[in-house]
Amino acid sequence: MEIIQFGSSVYAPELARDLDLLVFTKEKKGDQLDYLGALDGLDLTDHVDVVVLEAGEPLKGLALGILGANKILYGEGACLRAAVKDFDPSFDEAWAALETSKGNLKMGFSAKDPAVKDRYIRMAFNELAHAARMAALAYLAREELGWKGIEDALPSGYRKEFYQFFKTLHIEYFYHGNYPGQVEEEFSSWAKRVENYIKRLESELEKGVGAKSGKRL
C-alpha cells in the first residue's frame, strides 16, 4: 500500500551506509525475520533494512525517526499519517541520549580491556550525534510529512551544525574510530555544543518559530 524511505539515506544520503524502508501492507506474509531473510536472498549493492506494518498499526518507537526525515516512494502517505495520528514528538529522547553519552564515556574510562574502552568511547561520541539527531527530528516532526531530509528542512544555521555532528561524531569518531587522543576534552567540547543545539531548537519550537516554515500534521 505504501513504501516509505527513512533514516540517514534521506537526511544525509552522501554519508549513509544503509537504506531503511517502511512498508505498509494489507496483510503480512510472515514476521519481520521472514522479510529480512527475503532481502538476504537478493543481490543488493547496499545494506537494506525493512520494517513491515499492516495498515492501521501504530509506528510507536519508530515514529520520531520516520516523521523527522522521510521520503514517500509509493503511495500517498495516508497509511503513515494514520500510523502516527496519536504520536506527540518531544525532545525527551534527545536529552536521554545526551545523558547516556556521558555514562558511556565513564564506562569507557573504567574499562581495563582496551577494546572495550574503545567501544564505549565510540558509543559515547555516537550518542552525542544521536542526541542532535533526535532534537532535529523532534523539531521537524511537527511539520508536514514528506521532507527531503534534515539538511534541507532545518534552518541554514542548524543545518550546518547537524552536518558537522553527523560527519564527525557518527562517521569519523564512531564508525571509523578516528577520535583524538585527548578524549575527555574533545568529548566535553562536543557535548556542550550538542546541549546548546538541543536547547536552541527546543526554545524555537516552543516560541512557534518552527511552525512558520510549514504546516502542522
Image (cartoon, helix red, strand yellow):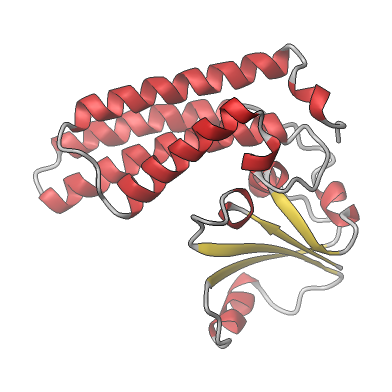
Residue at image coords 52%, 73%: 46
Q: In which quarter of the image is the C terminus?
A: top right
Which of these two is toward me, 175 or 15? 15
* Total count of labels: 0
Q: Where is residue 12 in the image (x, y as percent from the top left)?
A: 56, 50
Q: Quadrant of the N terminus?
A: bottom right
Q: Where is residue 166 in the image (x, y as percent from the top left)?
A: 46, 42
Please give left or right for residue 125 compared with residue 67 in the image: left
Residue at image coords 75%, 17%: 209
Residue at image coords 86%, 56%: 79
Residue 73 lies, with reference to residue 94, above or below; the image says below
Residue 195 lies, with reference to residue 36, above or below; the image says above
Residue at image coords 25%, 41%: 121
Can you tell which quarter of the image residue 98 is in?
top left
Please give left or right for residue 1 compared with residue 50 in the image: right
Residue 46 lies, with reference to residue 9, above or below; the image says below
Q: Where is residue 18 in the image (x, y as percent from the top left)?
A: 52, 64
Can you tell which quarter of the image residue 214 is in?
top right
Q: Which residue lies furthest to the left in this view?
A: 112
Which of these two is toward me, 89 or 30? 89
Please give left or right for residue 38 compared with residue 103 in the image: right
Q: Where is residue 162 in the image (x, y as percent from the top left)?
A: 52, 35
